[in-house]
Image: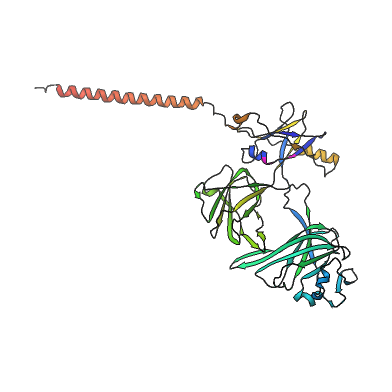
């Protein structure tokens, strides 16, 4: 599998992909090597990669100013026709239409639309989080969110956002976040588009997410449902899956196969190269659901498994029957390899060996020297993986036959020979003893 490089650099880095995990047979992914054009291995090592889930959030509360009910129709047009009153810091304090004036607190019982002032978010926002006092159950509410700088021209950020709050016995389903197209515009318009019960005490927090430098997107692999896995057999409350290739999954999407279904689930995993009851590790638990309301499908979010070894099998135990089996997709963060450009390019990445394991090359010192020269934020440029091709073929994947242990063989020869000698002596003694007894019986008695 060639690693393609463009340009000159003392070191390179390459993100592994699905094909590398499919070709690797070592549980710790140590059956890798990077070779130069002369076929010589070059110093390399695996490095940790920041997961995209590790996001830094800047989130704060923002005032909701309810638009008057009798001004709703005008507010839904391109022009809100509002008289705006601000405080000394420039924040909205009062809204007034041509016919009446209301504050957010006055209009809240019948409000279906709100205005948000984002003056405090200099870097913009990309999500909202809503909360309310009542009702605390049976809420499936739809919202439309748009943004503007002048309260006249509006840009749609989310045409149909759904928030959910449902409770049944001890089970609780809650989704209050609304994802938005990133915006730096000054005002948001939040409009309730369904006819459900009012959400009293509605409040909001706005936020901005920022990706950590060096993070790469998750890759997703669908797990295959199987009838049995080790000592377990699949049932309506126990669902078994094989993950091929085995990957270090950190997220799992579990989509139920029936509408308006929910269940409490526990998720177990089994690492690559391991088997037996003690090898199942509990990784996550929660509520899986699939709700259909007004033509919209609302599924549970992905479960977070955290970091762990490569997963070869999954077990989903549910408190109630789930038929058909849920569809399971696992997400993993591919590893990254850093290698030094020793020798002539091009460089190739070899994957999958029954015996070869890369040593722990001390290349940190070389990277530290490069950062001292080019700045502490310097990173090796990225190389790209080329097309895969077989080199040694299946022979590289087979473990070599163990050499004959001559010392052990000689010991067995000596032991077997000694046993034969002992057996021969025993047989000889028994034979001579029998002949002597026969002679004694035939000898006449002395007078």
Image x and y of residue 12, in percent: 77, 37
Quadrant of the image occupied by residue 274: top right
| On-image quarter of the N terminus | top right
Asked if 444 appears above or below 126 in the picture, the reply is above
Q: How is the image coloured?
A: rainbow
Left or right of 180 in this view: 419: left
Question: Residue at coordinates 86% horizontally, 70% vertically from top-left?
Answer: 92
- The single residue placed furthest to the left in the displayed view is 447
**What is the quadrant of residue 167 in the picture?**
bottom right
Residue 230 image position (x, y, % from top left): 51, 46
Q: Would you place residue 278 above or below residue 431 in this image?
A: below
In the rendered view of the protein, which quadrant contains the C terminus?
top left
Give the x, y percent position of residue 83: 89, 73
Give the residue displayed 32% in from the left and 24% down from the top. Answer: 425
* Near-viewer residue (332 or 28): 332
Image side of residue 60 versus residue 304, left or right: right
Is 15 covered by the magenta stretch? Answer: yes
**Is residue 265 toward the left or the right of residue 9 in the image?**
left
* Camera-nearest residue between 413 and 52: 52
Please give the name of the residue rendered at 36% of the width and 24% of the height, measured from the top-left corner.
421
Q: How many marks?
A: 0
In this orientation, which residue lies closer to the viewer: 147 or 366? 147
Q: Is residue 15 visible?
A: yes
Residue 285 is one of the magenta-drawn residues: no
Which quadrant of the figure has residue 162? bottom right
Q: Is residue 227 above or below residue 121?
A: above
Span shown in magenta? 14-18
Residue 66 seen in the figure: no
Q: Position of residue 86 (x, y in %)?
A: 89, 71
Q: Locate residue 104 relative to residue 229 in the image: left or right.
A: right
């Amino acid at each position: 599998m060639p690693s393609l490089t463009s340009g000159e650099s003392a070191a390179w880095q390459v993100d592994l992909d699905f094909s590398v995990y499919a070709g690797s047979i070592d549980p710790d992914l140590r059956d890798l090597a990077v070779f130069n054009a002369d076929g010589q291995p070059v110093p390399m090592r695996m490095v940790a990669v920041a997961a995209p889930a590790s996001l830094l959030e800047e989130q704060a509360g923002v005032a909701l100013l309810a638009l008057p009910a009798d001004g709703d129709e005008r507010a839904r047009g391109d022009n809100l026709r509002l008289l705006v009153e601000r405080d000394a810091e420039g924040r909205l304090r009062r809204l007034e239409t041509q016919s009446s004036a209301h504050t957010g607190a006055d209009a809240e019982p019948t409000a279906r639309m709100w205005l948000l002032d984002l003056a405090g978010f200099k870097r913009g926002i990309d999500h909202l989080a809503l909360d309310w006092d009542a009702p605390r159950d049976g809420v499936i509410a739809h919202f439309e969110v748009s943004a503007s700088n002048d309260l006249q021209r509006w840009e749609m950020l989310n045409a149909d956002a759904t928030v959910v709050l449902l409770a049944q016995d001890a089970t609780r389903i809650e989704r209050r976040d609304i994802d938005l197209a990133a915006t730096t515009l000054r005002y948001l318009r939040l409009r309730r588009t369904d006819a459900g019960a009012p959400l009293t005490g509605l409040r909001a927090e706005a936020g901005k997410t920022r990706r950590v430098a060096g993070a790469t997107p998750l890759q997703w692999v669908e797990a295959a449902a199987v009838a049995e896995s080790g000592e377990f057999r699949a049932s309506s409350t126990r669902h078994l899956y094989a993950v091929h290739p085995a990957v270090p999954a950190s997220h799992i999407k579990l989509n139920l196969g029936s509408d308006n279904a929910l269940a409490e689930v526990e998720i177990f995993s089994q690492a690559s190269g391991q088997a037996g009851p003690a090898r199942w590790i509990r990784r996550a638990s929660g509520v899986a659901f699939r709700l259909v309301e007004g033509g919209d499908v609302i599924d549970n979010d992905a479960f977070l498994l955290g970091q762990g070894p490569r997963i070869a099998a999954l077990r989903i135990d549910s408190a109630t029957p789930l038929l058909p089996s849920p569809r399971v997709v696992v997400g993993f963060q591919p590893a990254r390899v850093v290698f030094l450009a020793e020798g002539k390019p091009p460089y190739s990445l070899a994957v999958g060996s029954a015996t070869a394991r890369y040593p722990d090359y001390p290349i940190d010192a070389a990277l530290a020297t490069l950062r001292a020269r080019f700045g502490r934020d310097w990173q090796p440029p990225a190389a790209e993986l080329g097309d895969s091709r077989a080199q040694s073929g299946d022979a590289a994947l087979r473990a070599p036959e163990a050499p004959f242990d001559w010392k052990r063989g000689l010991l067995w020869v000596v032991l077997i020979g000694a046993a034969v000698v002992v057996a021969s002596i025993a047989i000889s003694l028994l034979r001579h003893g029998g002949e002597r007894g026969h002679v004694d019986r035939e000898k006449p008695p002395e007078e």
